[in-house]
Structures are given as C-alpha cells and as structure tokens.
Amino acid sequence: MEQAKKRGELYALLNMAAQRAYARGIQTGSGGNLSARDVEAGQMIVKASGGSFADCTSEGEGFVVTKLGGERICETDPKPTREVVLHGMLYTLLPMIGGVMHCHSPWAVAYAYRHDVLPMTTQHVKLKLGHDIPILNVDSPMLLAEHVPLVRQLFEENPKLTAFILRGHGVVAIGKDIIEAEHTAELVEETAQIASLREILDHKA
Ligand SMILES: [Zn+2]
C-alpha cells in the first residue's frame, strides 16, 4: 500500500515535469525523456518509447517501470525510451539523485554546435548551478554503453555537476527529484539563449 502511494506521487511529479517542459517548449513532439528513481524498489520510472511529454498523465500513462539496467518489470508494458541506458547509468553512478530530464531544447543545442562549454553567463546561473555546463561529443541519437565512461569522467571531474549538453542532440539535467531536474533543464536553456543573443549583439556592435 505504501509502495503504491509512493509510486502515485512519483507519477504525479513526472507528469508535472513533462507538462512544464512541453509548455515551456524545451521539448516538442515525441522527443526527449524523463525519469524518477523509486528508491525503495531500486527501480526507475521512465518515459515509454515514442510518446510525447504532452500525453503523459499523473496516473502513469506514458511511463514504464524498469530496473536500472533498463529491463521492464512487466513484460507486457510498453518499451522504455531508447535513452534508458542514460537514465540507468546516472542513477547507478549518482546515488543521491532522484530525477533525470533529457530534452532537445533548441537554444542549448544550437549553442553547443559552436562551443565546447556553456559558461555561467548570468548571475542566476552562477547562483543556482555554480558551474559551467560541459558539452559532450556523442555521435549517436542515444547514449550507448560505450559512452558511459565519457559521462562518468564528467562527474569525476566535477562531482557537483547538475547538467551537461550532448552536441547536436540535447540537454541532460539531474536533480534530487524530477522537478529539480526539470528546473535545471529550463535554466540551461535560458542560459544558452542569453549567451547566444549576447554573441549576436556583440557581433553587431
Ligand atoms: Zn534525445
């Protein structure tokens, strides 16, 4: 009973984060994915493959429960997102986190084509994140097992890291829960937009 209540709370938070990200436009269509860790069960709840953030519900539609390795708990459930490796490796690597947001937010993706790092452009990002946002080269539409050491190295270099960008792809943000991770993803997008606009204006000056 307690487990069902906890699961229901996680679905509500996941849905809130998915709807916020969609409304904010940091994810459109059927791209992106998000997850929450079920600490007691040692499992994660991830977005199902192919669905849209907009179609998720607080009753758990659009999500699937898996082990941290990505295997479904119930074989008849829909398949998890193809990014399930990314989510599982982050929960395994970072025991303190409870949520992961991955989205294809346009300013962050655009900025990352021409830079190796997104700097702390504003006072707000300095205050909230306190670190530059690294940009990783992963030449694949999804993180594969062979890319795991690259991500692990990022967190070894900065254990307080809360987000990174995959070049040509999207943002990955983590948090103590999925709401915090979603807020960080929004902040990365805002920072990338301001950094991009600043460069455009500097160029015209
Ligand atoms: Zn993606």
Image: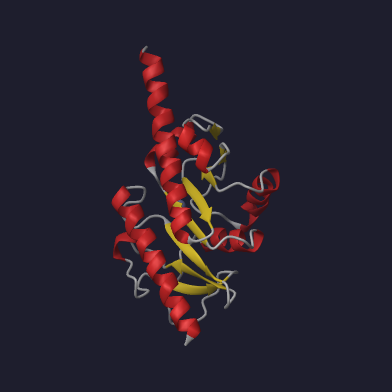
Residue 166 point in image, percent of width and height: 52, 44
| Relative image position of residue 16 (x, y in whole percent) | 36, 62
Decide if residue 87 is in sight here: yes
Out of 23 and 79, give the one closest to the viewer.
Answer: 23
Question: What residue sits 58% from the left and 60% below the top?
Answer: 97
How is colour applied across the structure in the image?
Answer: secondary structure
Residue 185 x %, y %: 45, 48
- Relative side of 176 to 196, left or right: right
What residue is drawn where x is 54% and y is 42%? 129
Is residue 78 visible in the rendered image? The answer is no
- Could you tell me how many numbered marks the image carries? 0
Q: Is residue 63 above or below residue 188?
A: below
**Residue drawn at x 63%, y 50% as measured from the top left:** 151
Which residue is at a point 40% across and 31% down the rendered structure image? 194
The relative height of residue 71 versus residue 192 in the rendered view (above or below) is below
Whether residue 136 sits left or right of residue 31 in the image: it is right
- Quadrant occupied by the C terminus: top left
Q: Residue furthest top?
A: 205
Q: Position of residue 51 (x, y in %)?
A: 35, 64
